[in-house]
Structure formats: C-alpha cells, structure tokens
C-alpha cells in the first residue's frame, strides 16, 4: 500500500489523495440495479468500473468491504415521488408476484455479472429486507425536525435543511434553480414544496408491497434504502460511495441530506460517479429503439447489432474508456475492441513460452511503474491498457527474434500481465466466437456440398439422411434455386 492513489471526488470536484478512514479497511457502497428488467450497458458499465476499483484496492492489500444493493421496492417511475413502483408495475403487467419479478431479474443480473467476470460484492442487501432500519432512520429525521407527515406519508423538508446545510452541494444544483424549475403544487399535493422528497409513502389499497409503520401501511422512499443499508454495514461514515452519474440527483443528494440529519455527517468521504453510455451518439432509451440488453449483445440478436459480441469484448470496451468519460457504443468500436482484446490475450499466451536472450532491450521495471501510475491516477484504465500494449509490442518482437529479454525480465513481464490483465482488469481468455462461427460455416458448407452431390447422383437416401440428422440438431436446410441454405431453428 505504498501506492498513493488519487481519486476524483464528485463532492469537491477535484482529485484527492485516497486516505481511507480506517486503513487498511475500506468501505465501499455502490448503488446497484432496480431489478425489473434485463441488464443493459448502463448496468455493465457501473458494475465493471467499481469492479476495477474493488480489484485494484484488493490488489494493493486493502481489506475492502464492498456493498452493492438490490433495489426491490420504493423506486417509483418518476423522481417526483409519483407513479407506480417500477417492480410492482412489471409484476402487474406480467401477472406475477413482485418478489417473483425481483428473483427472476436478480438471477439474470447475476448471470450477466458472472459472464462479465464481475466479482461478487461482499454483501448484496435488498431494500425490502431492511424496512425496520429505514423506519428507524425516518423516525430520527422527524425527531430532529427535518421531516413532516402528511396523509400517512413522510417527506423531507428540503427548504428547512437548506437553511443550515447546503442542499445541492454534490450535484451543484442550488435551491433557486430547484424552486424555479419545479412546477407549482396543485393544492392536492401532500408536499409543502415540490422538491421535498418522500421518506415514507402510504400505499394505495392495491399496492402489495407494504409494511406497517407509525405513519401508515406503506413502503420507504427510494433514497432511504441506501442511507440505511450503508450505515448498517459500513458505519455512519465510510470511504467510497459510488454509482452512475444519473444518480447524483436526486438520489445521492438526498442520501447526503438524510445522513446529515440522522447521523450528523455526510455518509461518504469520496463520491465516485461513472459517466453514461450513448449508442451511436444517442442517449440510450426504450423509445429510441436503441435499448440493447446484455443478452442481446452476447447473442447478436438485435437489429442494431451486426454481430454478437462476447462478454469479454464488452468488458474490454468499457475499460478502454476512463470511467468519467462518456462512452459511445457502435458496431465499429466494438469490432475494434474485439481485435484489441484478441491481440492482448494472444500476446499473453505467447509470453508464457517466450525464450530468454542474453540481454534486455526493454525496461520492464519502468513499464510496471507506469502501469501502477496509471491506476493510481483516478483508476485510469485506458492509459494502463496503452502501457500494456507497449508490452505486447515487446513480446511480439522478442518472439519474432527481433529483440531480446533476459529471463528475469520475462518473469517480471509475466507477473505484470497476470496482475494487470487477469486480476485487475479482470479479463479472461474466452473461446473466440468468430473462430467458432467460421468453423461451423465450414462444416455446414461441407455437409451441403455432399448432400448436393448425392442429389445430383439421385442418391435420395443419403440426401435425406443428411437433412434428417441435421434436423435433430435443430438445423433446418432450405433448398434454393442455387443450391441450399441452412439456419438454426429458434
Ligand atoms: Zn442508492
């Protein structure tokens, strides 16, 4: 841990030296998914960015307790505390119990995370399993005088809070903007001001996800869960709080306000936010028909995709950008990432059998220092990858007999590649899809040629046998005027 990490803190808007509150222990809380649909690139980016941070801190010897929650209640369709609960809505549409929706999409999320080689967090708490902790925290905020009850619901009094604390200090939003940008209340509203946020919501009669509380049968406001669970598992103040930039406001801003009143301090020392994903330069959204799930990327089954992209290609692509930059997905960019990854993994294979020479033409020790410097500078993975490609060049020229490395430098390079590529970037060798596809294409063309020949010789028995045997493998042969084509039946 001699390494000095500098980490960009969204709160101070500058890079700060990373000094954990209770080193070597590090508490890290990252807002996980609301599980009502299949995982997409936004989920992948956030998970992979914080997986990199988790892996690197562990590599340096820190004892990291990493909490990534699952939101299974309280996340409403609109940030203004209106609309249906996202999970309850999905359950209604699918005619399932809300907890069936939660289980189904949690399982799929975990499968995706395993495919992407994202390490499991230390604890993965669910909001619905921490209702008591959330109620206790709401009680404290009411006792301190910063929340009010209205018709069975409880709201945080933002205006009062802002008089003694700075509401908006994380997101940079100031009260004047909030006041001018929010609509007038219509008199029917339970809130004193439209920017007040719910700590507890009274459930409508048809709402299944409900728990008793001093105020009503209802459910917690979305921001409560992370405050309550972060505090329960990491203490009143922990080191890193992370999530996607879309969570800055109102989610994280509200968490800060809640913790300041209930615990007397900000919940986290460093706030880390990953930037967003765009697709062909456009924002990702269901209405734009560019909403591609991770499973669609892995199978290639989406009209915007020219081919399938493996989980490691997606992982490498995400790591090729710094987490605070926006990242634009396109077929071309993914194909380039796929090529880069293949080159890197092949060089790592070549390295294992590299023959030592009498002298070293390259400075491996210096390369190692540069790799650490890259990650110490706010986890700069693209710079790290550029340094690793310098190593790839060396490996290939030694392998081609154009340069030399002595045995101890080869060993150092092996450790370097294993540490950074496998352990820290979390990349692993995977069977190349394109190699497999080429093989299948080749085999199928041979079968079709044999069948064509049999047909020409009026050997119907052989032609039918080929068709039937392939049929058992769900491969359908279609005769066309130029010969035959094949496809795999869904
Ligand atoms: Zn959260």
Image (cartoon, rainbow, N blue to C red):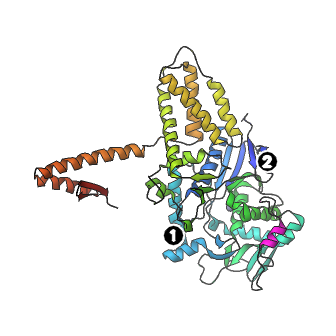
Element marked by disc 2: strand
Q: Earlier in the sequence, mark 2 or mark 1?
A: 2
**Which residue ends up furthest to the left in the rendered image?**
458
Q: Is residue 182 magenta?
A: yes
Given this view, does label 2 or label 1 mark the residue nearer the observer? 2
**Which residue ends up furthest to the front in the rendered image?**
481
On the rendered image, what quadrant is the N terminus found in?
A: top right
Q: For disc 1, does the CB lie below 8 Å from ligand 1?
A: no
In the displayed structure, does residue 177 sit left or right of residue 350? right
Q: CA distance from mark 2 to mark 1?
A: 43 Å
Residue 80, compared with residue 334, is above or below; it is: below
Q: Which residues are magenta?
A: 167-184
Element marked by disc 1: helix
Q: Which residue is mark 1?
A: 100
Q: For disc 2, does the CB lie below 8 Å from ligand 1?
A: no
Q: Residues within 10 Å of mark 2 (few under 14, many from 20)?
A: few
| Residue ID at (55%, 45%) | 316
Residue 174 placement (x, y as % from top left): 83, 64
Residue 142 placement (x, y as % from top left): 81, 73
Q: Is residue 157 in view from this perspective?
A: no
Q: Is residue 26 in view from this perspective?
A: yes
In the displayed structure, does residue 471 sit left or right of residue 183? left
For the stretch drawn in magenta, the main secondary structure is loop
Residue 412 placement (x, y as % from top left): 58, 26
| Residue ID at (64%, 72%) | 76
**Which residue ends up furthest to the right in the rendered image?**
164
Find out whether the residues at labels 2 and 1 contact each other: C-beta distance under 8 Å: no
| Residue ID at (57%, 54%) | 44
Quadrant field for ligand 1: bottom right
Q: Which residue is mark 2?
A: 14
Q: Is residue 476 magenta?
A: no
């Amino acid at each position: 841990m001699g390494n000095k990490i500098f980490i960009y803190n969204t709160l101070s808007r500058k890079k700060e030296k990373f000094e954990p509150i209770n080193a070597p222990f590090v508490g890290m809380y990252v807002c996980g998914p609301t599980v009502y649909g299949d995982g997409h690139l936004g989920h992948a980016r956030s998970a992979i960015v914080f997986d990199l941070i988790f892996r690197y801190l562990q590599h340096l010897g820190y004892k990291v307790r990493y909490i990534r929650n699952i939101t299974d209640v309280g996340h409403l369709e609109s940030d203004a505390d209106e609309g249906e609960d996202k999970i309850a809505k999905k359950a209604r549409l699918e005619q399932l119990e809300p907890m069936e929706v939660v289980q189904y999409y949690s399982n799929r999320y975990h499968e995706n995370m395993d495919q992407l080689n994202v390490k499991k967090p230390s604890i993965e708490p669910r909001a619905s399993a921490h209702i008591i902790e959330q109620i206790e925290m709401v009680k404290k905020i009411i006792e301190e005088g910063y929340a009010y009850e209205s018709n069975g619901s409880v709201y945080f009094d933002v205006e009062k809070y802002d008089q003694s604390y700075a509401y908006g200090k994380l997101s940079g939003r100031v009260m004047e903007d909030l006041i001018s940008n929010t609509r007038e209340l219509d008199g029917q509203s339970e809130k004193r001001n439209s920017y007040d946020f719910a700590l507890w919501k009274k459930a409508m009669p048809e709402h299944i996800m409900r728990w008793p509380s001093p105020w009503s049968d209802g459910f917690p406001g979305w921001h409560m869960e992370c405050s309550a669970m972060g505090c329960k598992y990491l203490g009143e103040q922990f080191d890193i709080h992370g999530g996607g930039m879309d969570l800055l406001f109102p989610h994280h801003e509200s968490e800060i306000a809640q913790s300041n009143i209930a615990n007397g301090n900000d919940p986290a020392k460093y706030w880390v936010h990953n930037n967003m994903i765009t697709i062909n330069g456009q924002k990702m959204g269901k209405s734009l028909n560019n909403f591609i799930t991770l499973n669609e990327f892995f199978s290639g089954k989406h009209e915007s995709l020219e081919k399938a992209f493996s989980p490691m290609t997606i992982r490498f692509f995400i790591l090729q950008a710094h987490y605070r930059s926006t990242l634009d997905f396109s077929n071309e960019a993914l194909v380039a990432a796929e090529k880069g990854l293949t080159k890197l993994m092949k060089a790592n294979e070549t390295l294992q059998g590299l023959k030592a020479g009498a002298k070293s033409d390259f400075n491996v020790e210096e390369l190692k220092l540069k790799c650490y410097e890259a990650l110490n500078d706010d986890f700069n993975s693209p710079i790290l990858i550029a340094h690793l490609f310098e190593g790839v060049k060396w490996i290939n020229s030694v392998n081609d007999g154009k340069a030399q490395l002595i045995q101890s430098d080869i060993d150092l390079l092996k450790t370097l590649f294993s540490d950074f590529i496998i352990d820290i970037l979390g990349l692993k060798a995977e069977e190349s899809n394109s190699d497999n596809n080429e093989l299948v294409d080749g085999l199928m063309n041979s079968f079709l040629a044999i069948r064509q020949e049999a047909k020409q010789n009026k050997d119907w028995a052989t032609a039918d046998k080929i068709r039937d045997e392939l049929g058992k493998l769900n491969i359908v042969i279609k005769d066309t005027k130029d010969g035959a084509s094949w496809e795999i039946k869904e």
